[in-house]
Image: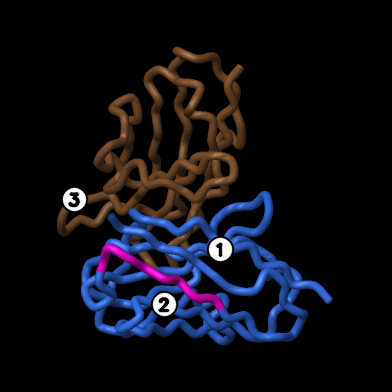
Amino acid sequence: DIVMTQTPSSQAVSAGEKVTMSCKSSQSLLYNENKKNYLAWYQQKPGQSPKLLIYWASTRESGVPDRFIGSGSGTDFTLTISSVQAEDLAVYYCQQYYNFPLTFGSGTKLEIK
Amino acid sequence: QVQLKESGPGLVQPSQTLSLTCTVSGLSLTSNSVSWIRQPPGKGLEWMGVIWSNGGTDYNSAIKSRLSISRDTSKSQVFLKMNSLQTEDTAMYFCARTIDYPGIPYYFDYWGQGVMVTVSS
């Protein structure tokens, strides 16, 4: 199975600050045939189900604010929130879909100071 | 408007079988795939398996021997059955519309609210 490692496990930032979180995979998620990275990001707010933010590592889902930016390739990926808002309080998960079984990282919990 | 809603018993005895239903609206099961994903309390997400738009299934090998996913397209329902439940199966169970390439699940763009299942005597 592909292991997804997310760091940090939690971080606290003030509203308006920029935040970055990392997701590393145990093998490359880049499919050479189409040059796509098979990685998605989700946001899970307290008491809610996960919400899709980003797919193909950098494509924003419709309706997701443009302050959420996905980047990276191969085994190293980053989710950046350019200017954190209070409503961004959540746990963020990455997920690979390069191989069966689909696997998720353990999450990064974002807290607002 | 796409909606998915899980239902099922909140409490299951150890060694018994779990049966859950995912009722979907706003999409057709004959042209959409649906996965089950679970989340133990305070922990991360585990993909369990998928039922494809053609009715075929694929499962996470870690639980494949205990899991079965089926559907009733006339009722727009997807079913999960998992046997030999243990306390470590206590989790929130979600169903989710799965974006896919034929035979390959990708990501999940619509999720149900989840149903909490506790395995305890």
Residue type at mark 2: give it.
Answer: Val
As for residue B90 lying within the magenta part, the answer is no
The crowding category of the residue bearing disc 2, from other C-alpha atoms within 10 Å (few below 14, some 14 to 19, many at least 20), is: many
Q: Is residue B4 left or right of residue A44?
A: left
Q: Is residue B100 left or right of residue A105?
A: left
Farthest-out residue, right: B121
Where A24 falls versus A18 (above or below)? Answer: below
Question: Which of label 3 and label 2 is nearer to you?
Answer: 2
Label 3: element kind: loop
* Chain to which mark 1 belongs: B
Residue type at mark 1: give it.
Answer: Arg
Mark 2 and mark 1 lie on one chain; the one further toward the N terminus is: 1
Q: Main secondary structure of the magenta part?
A: strand
Q: Quadrant of residue B72?
A: bottom left
Q: CA distance from mark 1 to mark 3?
A: 31 Å
Horizontal and vertical percent for residue B8? 59, 73
Residue that label 2 marks? B78
- Mark sitting on residue A35: 3
Magenta-highlighted residues: B20-27
Q: Quadrant of residue B103?
A: bottom left
Q: Residue at x 46, y 14 (%)?
A: A17
One can see residue B47 in this view: no
Q: Is residue B10 left or right of residue A42?
A: right
Q: Residue at x 50, y 62 (%)?
A: B94
**Both labels 1 and 3 in a single chain:** no
Label 1: element kind: strand
Q: Is residue A94 left or right of residue B16?
A: left
B64, A43: nearer the viewer: A43
